[in-house]
Amino acid sequence: MEVSKIMTKPMISSKDLHLYYGKKEALKGIDLAIYQNEITAMIGPSGCGKSTYLRCLNRMNDLIPNVTITGSIVYGDKDIYSPKMDTVELRKEIGMVFQQPNPFPFSVYENVVYGLRLKGVKDKQLLDQVVEESLKAASVWEETKDNLHKSALSFSGGQQQRICIARVLAVNPKIILLDEPTSALDPVSSGKIENTLLELKSKYTMVIVTHNMSQASRISDKTAFFLNGSLIEYDATKKIFLDPSKQETNDYISGRFG
């Protein structure tokens, strides 16, 4: 009995989460539980709240002026919106990969070790090891191993995005948030990122915002459909795509709007 309790406990979950930009309500009471070692996809038309919700999970919306958030997000038995929460530590455990590849303007090596250097890690052997392990895990070691001291910006967009994934992995996060990580990439690069995410699933919990329905159906375990700031439906991906419970989900999946 205890084992099943552990298995079903969410990795991170929101309860009655509302977010306002000024007076505009962008999220309308979202209840959602994300489970360990799963890829959860968030789909819905532009402006529906999915990226806003994603940024709530590691408090990135704190950086936007005039935002008000009510409700709770519980991660590891703590409400991340508690005044005692250390947001720097939180973002190490809940890393983020953005829509546009955003490597820092220095070498591949320095990009990957950036978070470790901030923590004061100086052991070169350890740094070397983390660089190799992270780039391998992000499926970009072969392309970069002979050019570790070359600017990360000199690589292709798909390679840059995988370097950014390696940078997140280097600080050993528990959860990885990905905000449309392949929307700026060609189909071949997108496929490589998808394969990378599937390989990482055994070690990490991932939440991905995507406009690409076939991507969501290919790689995610569960899918959440957002519309006008509300969570319309959340279920196993196969159920959402083949037999949705709500008419709005069916209309969106079948291309009737959005």
Image (cartoon, rainbow, N blue to C red):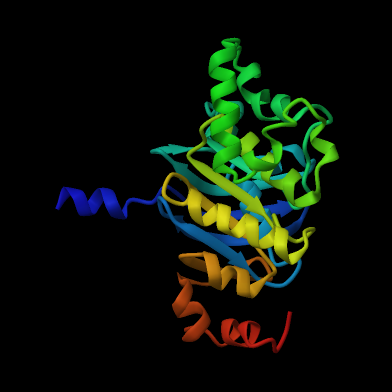
Rendered residue at 66%/66% (across/down): 229
Residue 26 appears in the picture as rendered:
no
Report x, y in % for residue 244: 49, 83
Relative side of 187 to 172, left or right: right
Report x, y in % for residue 30: 54, 60
Of 192 and 72, nearer the camera is 192
Relative side of 114 to 37, left or right: right
Rendered residue at 56%/58% (across/down): 195
Relative side of 210 to 99, left or right: left
Relative side of 114 to 138, left or right: right
Q: Is residue 70 above or below residue 191?
A: above
- The extreme front residue here reads 146
Of 83 and 156, nearer the camera is 156
Rendered residue at 68%/24% (across/down): 114
Q: Could you tell me which quadrant the C terminus lies in?
A: bottom right
Report x, y in % for residue 239: 44, 79
Q: Is residue 87 above or below residue 38?
A: above
